[in-house]
Image: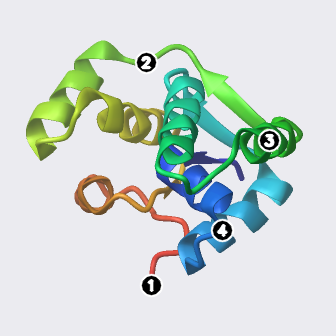
């Protein structure tokens, strides 16, 4: 079954961070594919460039990573439900950007992979399963 993956997980891969949730999401992505809100494309690239500026990534490293990422089954979801999106944003005190991931998961009935603590709490409150969550 596909799942929703947020940018925090993908950036952890790029940085080589050792996180069980990110590792499980990567394995699951290889098997099942993932859905993302359309802002994901921009958010991932922005985070990678920010990490270049901090000296944590290089331009060639970013290019390699983006090439590898392009080979994975990540599909954009371009049809958010605006009312649900704004409701989730307000209910959980999220940014609209973070709530976009949760909205896709809620609407599609899919688990969510995130390393963002506030987004994870909101997902749990909405009874959205988390990829890699300790049960």
Nearer to us of marks 3 and 4 is: 3
Q: Which residue is mark 1?
A: 134
- Percent x, y for residue 14? 66, 55
Marked residue nearer the N-terminal end (3 or 1): 3
Residue at x 84%, y 58% (from the top left corner): 31
Other-residue count near label 1 (Cα within 10 Å), few / some / many at <14 / 14–19 / ≥20:
few
Could one spot residue 6 in this view of the protein? no
Question: Whole-percent x and y of residue 68?
Answer: 85, 45
Q: Pointer 2: residues within 10 angstroms few (<14), some, or many (20+)?
A: some
Q: Earlier in the sequence, mark 2 or mark 4?
A: 4
Disc 3 or 4, which lies upstream in sequence? 4
- Secondary structure state at the residue bearing disc 4: loop
The residue that label 3 is drawn on is 60
How far from the left and from the top, in percent, is residue 9?
A: 55, 56
Q: Which residue is mark 4?
A: 16
The residue that mark 2 highlights is 80
For label 3, count other residues whose C-alpha is less than 10 Å away and answer few (under 14), some (14-19) or many (20+).
few
Nearer-N-terminus badge (2/3): 3
| In the foreground, 57 or 10 | 57
Q: CA distance from mark 2 to mark 3?
A: 34 Å
Relative to residue 89, is residue 130 depicted above or below? below
Mark 2 or mark 4: which is in front? 4
Sooner in the amino-acid sequence: mark 1 or mark 2: 2
Local SS, label 1 = loop
**How much space separates mark 3 and mark 4, taking CA atoms?**
15 Å
- The residue drawn where x is 59% and y is 78% is 18
Inter-mark Cα distance, 1 to 2: 29 Å
């Amino acid at each position: 079954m596909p799942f929703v993956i947020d940018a925090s997980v993908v950036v952890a891969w790029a940085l080589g961070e050792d996180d069980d949730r990110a590792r499980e999401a990567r394995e699951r992505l290889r098997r099942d594919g993932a859905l993302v809100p359309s802002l994901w494309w921009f958010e991932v690239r922005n985070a990678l460039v920010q990490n270049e500026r901090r000296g944590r990534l290089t331009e060639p490293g970013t290019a390699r990573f983006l090439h590898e990422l392009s080979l994975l089954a990540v599909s954009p979801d371009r049809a958010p439900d605006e009312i649900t999106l704004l409701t989730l944003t307000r209910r959980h005190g999220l940014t609209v950007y973070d709530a976009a991931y949760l909205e896709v998961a809620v609407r599609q009935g899919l688990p969510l992979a995130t390393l963002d603590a506030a987004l994870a709490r909101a997902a749990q409150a909405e009874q959205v399963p988390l990829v890699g969550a300790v049960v």
